[in-house]
RNA sequence: GCGCGCUUAGCUCAGUUGGUAGAGCAACUCAUUUACACUGAGAAGGUCGGGGGUUCAAGUCCCUCAGCGCGCACCA
């Protein structure tokens, strides 16, 4: 009897030892896999942000992906799982800014270079912690191919991508309405906005012969256009472009009446004034009728000279004072105190977004691309899903995806932050140069802005494989087989990867998008540092083992569904790990001295084969949670509770039937351990080593899936 | 407003192409040192959110209502 089996299973002792064994084997790298691994299977790890440490949500993601990767590897695929981390531009920068604030340092005091040094140190620390966390999960990532969204190679990819899109006129610089975050002092994309419902006041003012409503009186200084619906009978006597003089905040102004169908006649009085500089819709209207646009608020959220006596005031402070003045002038009609406003805030800094017209860089999603039969980037994003080249699981997210594309505006990619890929564009007076390298002659200055972090992550499936170089990896492993992000980054990441891959290399980035849900705490609350419910996976691993954690996260939740984390469940699977440990002890004890016949076939093995067929079909059809529960049920309640109990009597007799039973037990148990391996890799590898007692190369991680049932060919289209 | 989900045992959730309702945890009754107490045996627990429809047959498909969650959107 192996000494290890004499005491209960101890994951702590086993896991780090086993992980080292795996790393040493080299099998994480597909190049080192034995001959039988032919067809390629590839997947990239959604790179975690280097903003701190991983939480249980990442553990869920790692568990699912490693389970799939291990299954595919056993099935005979030449399997690659690419690791990496994301520099997460704004998120990381604002994190470091906050840390420096505590030391009383502001980033402008130390300057760009010194600040970036600090960020780099922070990012490196985060990275190291994250990698060690991922390894503790048992993730079989090929570390020799590790990448970072901001490393040298990815920088070349980013610049190459930018230039290609710039040359094709898809990236342009223009004065457009953008989302300005006064707190983060940068613009952000539409997708980085989080809307919060806030109760506020809704004011109605007299504006000449009209009454207009607004929730933001502080933007109204420059309002000199009155918009009315052309069909509104109440105002039928007013003509389009008619000019009137009205008394307003700082005296009389000349206003112009605009008749346009954008107005909702049923809302308020059916009349509104517009502020083209600080509102997306107003801007669109102003463009349509070539109206003047005036800036009211500066980038610090303060009022400009147009505000007259209110100049320099913060908009929040100015609001009530402006209302007061209007009231004194007899222009205030009413105040609705129960108005619910949807306030746009910045995802990362929490700042209240101020729409502004600014000179920024954009990706044009509506421009017909000549070389692609006049298709737009929107078309390139939509088509692979429509044609079924990319499958989204669960399927209903396809509708969500289309819906997003329909509403998509040009993607603003420039950011006024320091941490990130600097835009590869140089200016000299009126000249502009875009290139991989800086121009060599004098007088050029590079654009100080950096790129949206999602620009670099959207190249991830091919930038990690060597693009823009034509590498062997790229040829072998792209398009990748599968991607497994949470559904919350379907737009941020998945959609943009499809966009970039389609445009830059003319192929899809992955064949299947398998989305997972969000893991919440026991009470259904989102994990976050601020609510103090954050859990470090390592903490749980030390208590129950990585196997138990993995199994508890995978089983019991349908794909794409949110789930609640329950420590009791982990505890249950720790018991399960010990159960299979004891089963192994029982079997080895009982088969001692007997000859093992691997060709045995009887009722037990036939019945087992049917179970394995069922489980394998679940594995091949993304029903992993079912596969996990089925193998658990079989092992504990069929194999242990029934078959082993019954075997005790049979083996006691010591006849031919007993010998056959012993062989059947060993055969079935061997295969049970294999099937369980993708879910609980550590304990199964340890048991394998005890059963096999062979040399180091004979690892369960490269053992063949039972009965040759798993597909070793790519899925049929 | 538009879109997408969810509602199944006390709790947390599974339930694949429609074919007699499942698991884990909790609670209940027994077994008491067995490969395993990180255990075993057993019993209990559900008109599958309400209503209607299709079908020989509906938790599953269709319609409708309600509650909850999420995403998107230009209600000034």
Image (cartoon, grey):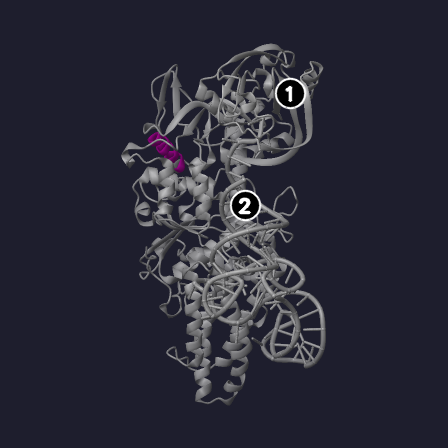
**Mark 1 nearby-residue class (10 Å; few <14, some 14–19, many ≥20):** many
When asked about the image quadrant of residue A332, the answer is top right
**Protein chain holding label 2:** A
Q: Nearer the viewer, residue A170 or A679?
A: A170
Q: Residue at x 52, y 33 (%)?
A: A90
When asked about the image quadrant of residue A622, the answer is bottom left
Q: Nearer the viewer, residue B64 or A39?
A: B64
**Protein chain holding label 1:** A
The percent coordinates of residue A331 (x first, y second) are 67, 17
Q: Which residue is mark 2?
A: A129
Q: Which residue is mark 1?
A: A205
Secondary structure of the residue carrying tag 2 is helix
The quadrant of the rendering that contains the C terminus of chain A is bottom left
The percent coordinates of residue A271 (x first, y second) are 57, 23
Of badges 2 and 1, the one in the foreground is 1
The numbered mark, 2 or 1, whose residue comes first in the sequence reads 2
User: What predominant SS class does the magenta segment belong to?
Assistant: helix
Residue A327 is labelled as none
Q: Residue at x 51, y 80 (%)?
A: A590
Q: Is residue A150 above or below residue A536?
A: above
Q: Left or right: A315 with respect to A693?
A: right
Q: Gap in Å between the C-alphas at discs 2 and 1?
A: 57 Å
Q: Left or right: A221 with respect to A397?
A: right
**Mark 2 nearby-residue class (10 Å; few <14, some 14–19, many ≥20):** some
Secondary structure of the residue carrying tag 1 is strand
Q: Is residue A347 visible?
A: no
Can residue A155 be found in the magenta stretch? yes
The boundaries of the magenta stretch are: A154-165
């Amino acid at each position: 009897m192996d000494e290890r089996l004499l005491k209960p299973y101890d994951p702590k002792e086993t896991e780090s030892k086993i992980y080292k064994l795996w790393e040493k084997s080299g099998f994480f790298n597909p190049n080192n896999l034995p001959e039988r691994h032919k067809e390629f299977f590839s997947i990239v790890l959604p790179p975690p942000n280097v903003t701190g440490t991983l939480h249980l949500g990442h553990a869920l993601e790692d568990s699912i992906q490693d389970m799939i990767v291990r299954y595919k590897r056993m099935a005979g695929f030449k399997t690659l799982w690419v690791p990496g981390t994301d520099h997460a531009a704004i998120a990381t920068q604002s994190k470091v800014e906050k840390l420096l604030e505590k030391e009383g340092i502001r980033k402008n005091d130390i300057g760009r270079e010194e600040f970036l040094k600090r960020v780099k140190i922070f990012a490196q620390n985060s990275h190291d912690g994250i990698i060690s966390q991922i390894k503790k999960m048992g993730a079989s990532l090929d570390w020799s191919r590790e990448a970072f969204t901001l490393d040298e190679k990815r920088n070349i990819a980013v610049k190459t991508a930018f230039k290609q899109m710039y040359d094709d006129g898809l990236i342009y610089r223009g004065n457009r309405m953008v989302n300005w975050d006064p707190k983060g002092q940068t613009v952000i994309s539409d997708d980085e906005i989080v809307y919060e419902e806030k109760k506020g006041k809704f004011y109605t003012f007299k504006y000449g012969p009209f009454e207009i409503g607004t929730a933001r009186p502080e933007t109204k200084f420059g309002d000199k256009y009155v918009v009315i619906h052309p069909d509104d009978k109440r105002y039928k006597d007013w003509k389009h472009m008619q000019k009137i003089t009205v008394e307003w905040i700082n005296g009389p102004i000349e206003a112009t009446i605009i008749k346009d169908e954008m107005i909702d006649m049923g809302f308020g009085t059916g009349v509104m004034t517009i502020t083209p500089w600080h509102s997306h819709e107003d801007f669109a209207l102003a463009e349509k009728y070539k109206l003047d646009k005036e800036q009211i608020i500066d980038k610090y959220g303060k009022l400009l000279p147009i505000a007259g006596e209110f100049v320099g005031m913060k908009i929040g402070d100015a609001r009530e004072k402006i209302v007061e003045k209007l009231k004194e002038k007899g222009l205030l009609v009413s105040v609705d105190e129960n108005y619910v406003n949807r306030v746009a805030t910045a995802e990362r800094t929490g700042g209240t977004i101020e729409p502004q017209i600014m000179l920024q860089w954009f990706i044009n999603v509506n421009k017909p691309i000549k070389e692609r039969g006049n298709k737009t980037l929107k078309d390139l994003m939509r088509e692979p899903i429509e044609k079924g080249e990319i499958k989204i699981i669960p399927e209903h997210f396809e509708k969500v995806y289309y819906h997003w594309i329909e509403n998509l505006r040009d993607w603003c990619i420039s950011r006024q932050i320091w941490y990130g890929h600097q835009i590869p564009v140089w200016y000299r007076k009126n000249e502009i140069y875009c290139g991989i390298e800086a121009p060599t002659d004098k007088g050029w200055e590079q654009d100080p802005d950096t790129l949206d972090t999602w620009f670099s992550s959207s190249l991830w499936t091919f930038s990690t494989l060597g693009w823009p170089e034509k590498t062997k990896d790229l040829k072998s492993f792209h398009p990748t087989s599968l991607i497994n992000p949470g559904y919350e980054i379907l737009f941020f990441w998945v959609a943009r990867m499809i966009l970039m891959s389609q445009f830059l290399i003319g192929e899809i980035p992955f064949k299947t998008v398998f989305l997972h849900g969000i893991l919440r705490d026991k009470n259904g609350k989102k994990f976050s540092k601020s609510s103090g419910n954050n859990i470090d996976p390592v903490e749980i691993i030390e208590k129950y083992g990585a196997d138990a954690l993995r199994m508890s996260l995978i089983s019991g939740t349908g794909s794409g569904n949110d789930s609640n984390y329950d420590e009791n469940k982990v505890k249950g699977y720790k018991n399960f790990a010990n159960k299979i440990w004891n089963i192994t002890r029982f079997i080895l004890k009982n088969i001692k001295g007997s000859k093992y016949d691997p060709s045995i076939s009887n009722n037990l093995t036939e019945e087992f084969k049917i179970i394995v067929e069922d489980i394998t079909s679940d594995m091949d059809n993304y029903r992993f949670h079912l596969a996990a529960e089925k193998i658990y049920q079989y092992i504990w309640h069929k194999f242990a509770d029934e078959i082993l109990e019954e075997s005790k009597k049979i083996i006691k007799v010591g006849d031919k039937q007993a010998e056959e039973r012993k062989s059947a037990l060993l055969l079935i148990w061997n295969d049970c351990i294999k099937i369980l391996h993708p879910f609980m890799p550590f304990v199964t590898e340890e048991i394998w080593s005890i059963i096999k007692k062979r040399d180091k190369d004979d690892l369960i991680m490269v053992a063949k899936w039972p009965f040759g049932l798993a597909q070793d060919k790519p899925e049929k289209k």
